[in-house]
């Protein structure tokens, strides 16, 4: 009888412990799932700070417009004129680049990048009909391949690089850049013209990264737009998660 009671008590205790263990296991599995979900975003979203000092330039396309030869005679012949479009030069540009890895391997990744830049730029339109301006923003969307350091969260290489391609919207003359009023006072009447302060252009971006002794990741970024006269060279500081 004594041994029977001990066997019954041990069985009940085992069943009770198993039930508690099962509930605890569910909680642990749920916790692991939450951590895993959070970890994916944490390990696949990166942010870089970039700074450019006198290393961002843009040559504007030529300006075409039509005028009357004689302002006082509306029946005078029209004359087509082409002017130099001018240029943009930025003494300082700050770029914030969020990046998300779409596919990650052990040593490389494929990512979507958006290096959004704002520049304290001077814009010389070198034109009779367009005023000079200041300040600009760039809004690119790029698809990039990276290998080595800064390509994935777990990569411990000393050096790395990335190559990206996509499209970029450049909005210039956030201050100024409108129609030049004295143009009419010079006895020239514009009958048609196209003043543009924003362009969509292709963009290529090349970056080189290196890990310093304090494990912080620095780098150099070169962005160019083939055929448009745009170039930007930046110093890269990757926000560290470790």
Image: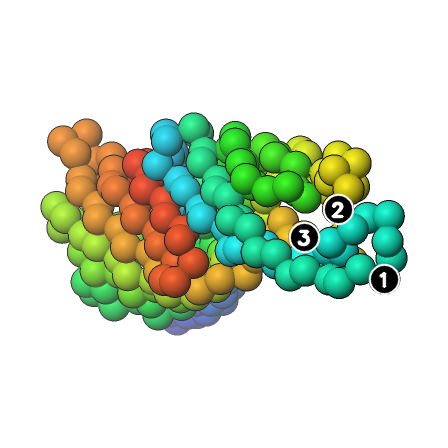
Question: Which of label 1 and label 2 is nearer to you?
Answer: 1
Where residue 225 sits: x, y (%)? 39, 58
- Give the residue pinned by disc 3: 195
- Give the residue pinned by disc 1: 75
Question: Which of label 3 and label 2 is nearer to you?
Answer: 2
Q: Nearer the viewer, residue 90 or 22?
A: 90
- Give the residue pinned by disc 2: 188
Q: CA distance from mark 1 to mark 2?
A: 13 Å
Dot 1: element? loop
Question: Which of label 1 and label 3 is nearer to you?
Answer: 1
Q: Nearer the viewer, residue 1 or 108?
A: 108
Lower sequence index among marks 3 and 2: 2
Where residue 97 sits: x, y (%)? 44, 47
Q: Quadrant of residue 214 in the image?
A: top left
Dot 2: element? loop
Q: CA distance from mark 3 to mark 2?
A: 17 Å
Disc number placed over residue 242 in the picture, else none: none
Q: CA distance from mark 1 to mark 3?
A: 25 Å
């Amino acid at each position: 009888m004594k041994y029977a009671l001990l066997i019954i008590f041990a069985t009940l205790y085992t069943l009770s412990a198993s039930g508690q263990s099962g509930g605890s296991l569910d909680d642990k599995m749920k916790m692991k799932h939450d951590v895993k979900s959070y970890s994916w975003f944490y390990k696949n979203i990166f942010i870089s700070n970039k700074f450019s000092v006198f290393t961002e330039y843009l040559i504007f396309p030529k300006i075409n417009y039509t005028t009357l030869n004689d302002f006082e005679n509306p029946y005078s012949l029209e004359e087509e004129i082409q002017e130099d479009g001018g240029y943009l030069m930025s003494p300082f540009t700050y770029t914030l680049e969020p990046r998300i890895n779409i596919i990650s391997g052990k040593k490389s990744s494929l990512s979507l990048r958006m290096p959004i830049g704002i520049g304290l730029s001077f814009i010389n339109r070198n034109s009779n009909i367009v005023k000079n301006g200041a300040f600009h923003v760039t809004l690119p969307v790029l698809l990039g391949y990276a290998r080595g350091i800064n390509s994935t969260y777990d990569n411990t290489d000393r050096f790395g690089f990335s190559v990206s391609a996509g499209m970029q919207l450049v909005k210039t003359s956030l201050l100024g850049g409108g129609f030049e009023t004295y143009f009419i006072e010079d006895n020239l009447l514009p009958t048609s013209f196209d003043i543009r302060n924003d362009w969509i252009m292709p963009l290529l971006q090349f970056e080189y990264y290196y890990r310093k002794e304090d494990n912080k990741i620095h780098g150099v970024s070169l962005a160019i737009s083939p055929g448009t006269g745009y170039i930007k060279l930046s110093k890269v500081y990757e926000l560290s998660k470790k």
